[in-house]
Image: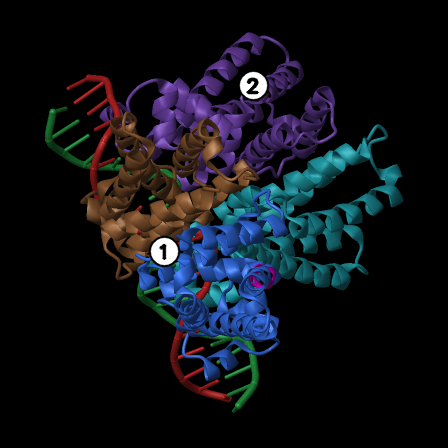
Chain colours: A cyan, B purple, C blue, D brown, E green, F red
Amino acid sequence: MDAAARVLAERGYEGASTNRIAQAAGVGIGSLYQYFPNKDAIVVMVLDRFADRLADRLDAQIEATMAEPWPVAGRALLDAQIRLLEEDAGLLRVMVEQAPRLGPFDKSLALQRRLTDLVRVYLLLNHEEFREDLDVEAALWILAEAVGMLSIRYVLDRPPISHERMVDELAELIIGYLRA
Amino acid sequence: MDAAARVLAERGYEGASTNRIAQAAGVGIGSLYQYFPNKDAIVVMVLDRFADRLADRLDAQIEATMAEPWPVAGRALLDAQIRLLEEDAGLLRVMVEQAPRLGPFDKSLALQRRLTDLVRVYLLLNHEEFREDLDVEAALWILAEAVGMLSIRYVLDRPPISHERMVDELAELIIGYLRA
Amino acid sequence: MDAAARVLAERGYEGASTNRIAQAAGVGIGSLYQYFPNKDAIVVMVLDRFADRLADRLDAQIEATMAEPWPVAGRALLDAQIRLLEEDAGLLRVMVEQAPRLGPFDKSLALQRRLTDLVRVYLLLNHEEFREDLDVEAALWILAEAVGMLSIRYVLDRPPISHERMVDELAELIIGYLRA
Amino acid sequence: MDAAARVLAERGYEGASTNRIAQAAGVGIGSLYQYFPNKDAIVVMVLDRFADRLADRLDAQIEATMAEPWPVAGRALLDAQIRLLEEDAGLLRVMVEQAPRLGPFDKSLALQRRLTDLVRVYLLLNHEEFREDLDVEAALWILAEAVGMLSIRYVLDRPPISHERMVDELAELIIGYLRA
DNA sequence: GATGAATGAGTGTTCATTCAT
DNA sequence: CATGAATGAACACTCATTCAT
């Protein structure tokens, strides 16, 4: 699995031939097929594991900051999210760019859904602070996509923006969008 | 080129074999290689042309609405952008999901740069309306990415949000983000 | 062996992978190779055992009918032969259609030889009833092959001929061929 | 095609790998797939061609001997059939032993059907010469299988019987079976 | 003696690319 | 300039066989 993740991160879906993965893992090609029915199953499992790890660590972050006031907690979460994504940009790229062919990822969706639910609760609890005409579902979709994609593009494209600034801007984007 | 665009839109990068493109174009496979050094060059050119067409038509829209006050012009541009993307979702998907392997797209960047420049001018001309601490370059990157990716995801993923509402939300996102 | 016979009868030579046979037998694949040098040895042994069982049961039939007059005994033997073949058409098919690659079968030949000898004795004892010019060895080969192949094809191809009729026709074929 | 026939005759279905066929043909493996969709298509076409050639030449023989009286014509046909089979025993073996996996052969059936029809006509025209109780369809199946399989086994197994004797015995078998 | 994870040569097949015509 | 037959490296995958435990 580690070898597969490594090859996948370095060479992308197409470049990651089963033989190359086996070689990187230091095992025979046949051994791969003792544990996975086919190549896609390997890729899916690698990406699932990647998504799981992200989710687990983000969960930890959420729990650790739940007690804090919303602005602090939110900022901490954004900070953690970007930091986590930065840890394995190679896999992130594969996930974002070649995952579509493997069908939508339950795991990655689960992560997004968890965060979305969190924000939904926040919106409902504090609705007096926000625009009255807010279409909650639409706003949630917009925010999830915007924050998710921006974090990812930030990590993959490395624009000349510092990490702290990026967190601030994302926070600004969210708050500016929601408030009246 | 038209044939290549058609095949690419319908079958994606992998499904678009050079033979299939040649057949769709009604020419011999050999002729393809008289004009393109390899398959990727074909794909790049198709996507470049696609980006150019988008840019041209958005340019027209810009010129047509330059006279209008900013809020109206901006909304019209967002509306036009989404509408244009919707016209060829197939190519758009190829561009977004499989193009990255082909290196960053000069042309698609050019489009983004044009819009970015436009907004930069707007920001400088009206800086008194916005946050004082605004880091213009960071803000432009954020906005370009956010608006671009959101428009694209909206077209490709078809979330349950009406076209008009989407335009409104994007406008809200931009304005909320920029204003003090 | 039973497991191998079962798998072989159900899935043919190619479908009977060594792992499948081991699994059907409820033993490890390694154990197979403690007792057989390779896959073909397993197949040969299964088919040998199959041929042996056929021979044994046909022997019993021979003994049981030796006392009867020739026409009755012969017909009983033909009847028994077809009935025995019908009992395991799966293995029979493997034997006839994929065995040849495994070299001629000593065992299956032994069966044929036993029957041939029986008929040879019959011919010698009753030579006055038959064609004078009969080349005994040629006739025996012809009869053994014809009766054997016809019985097998009858079982495997199921032509629209009743069992009793089939026995009658075979008897007719033999008698018509031998008599003056 | 010739190369494929050669390899097939020499090494059987499994031994005839596509690469081996391509090499024997002196062409790249890719070229094979310009003309055949897959391996089985190659094998089927080789065997079809083989069956066609047999049929054509047997047809010629039929026409050439139609004028002769039945006994002479029949004997000539048997002689021709064995002689033709002898010309390519390798392919014949493949056809007989591995054809089943490729589905029944239309072509080989067509040949058998043609001969069967011929004999059916003969039986109807001369029914007074034969057993009264003859079940024509059963008899035809028996004769077709017996004569076909015996000819094939004769060619493949080379029993110690001369060619002329074999023809005589087959004729005897047929006549003895049919006559009253 | 039993095990089954490990093996890798081999399979059928694809497709971007070339080059003689 | 157009052609398309020819190419072969590369791919995903299988399975009979081995051998350390």
Q: Would you say residue B116 is visible in this rendering?
A: no
Above or below, A87 against A137 in this view is below
**Horizontal and vertical percent position of residue D135:** 56, 39
Name the quadrant of the C terminus of chain A.
top right
Query: As rendered, which of A18 and B143 lies closer to the eye?
Result: A18
Q: Is residue E7 left or right of residue A158?
A: left
What type is the residue that disc 1 sits on? Arg
> Could you tell me how many numbered marks the image carries?
2
What type is the residue that disc 2 sits on? Glu
How packed mark 1 is, by other alpha carbons closer than 10 Å (few <14, some 14-19, many 20 or more), is: few
Q: CA distance from mark 2 to mark 1?
A: 91 Å
Magenta stretch containing residue C161, yes or no?
no
Q: Which residues are magenta?
A: C80-85
Q: Does the magenta stretch mainly form a helix, a strand or a loop?
A: helix
The residue that disc 1 covers is C131
Residue shown at 48%/52% (left/top)? C150
Residue shown at 62%/19% (left/top)? B74
Residue shown at 65%/43% (left/top)? A147
Query: As rendered, which of B172 and A155 lies closer to the eye?
Result: A155
Q: Nearer the viewer, mark 2 or mark 1?
A: 1
**Horizontal and vertical percent position of residue A151:** 59, 46
What chain letter is assigned to the residue under label 2?
B
Q: Is residue A146 left or right of residue B3?
A: right
- Secondary element under disc 2, as helix, strand or loop, is helix
What chain letter is assigned to the residue under label 1?
C
Query: As rendered, which of B8 and A130 lies closer to the eye?
Result: B8
Residue lying furthest front:
C128
Callouts 2 and 1 close, C-beta under 8 Å: no
**Horizontal and vertical percent position of residue B180:** 69, 33
- Secondary element under disc 1, as helix, strand or loop, is loop
The residue that disc 2 covers is B87
**Horizontal and vertical percent position of residue B150:** 62, 32
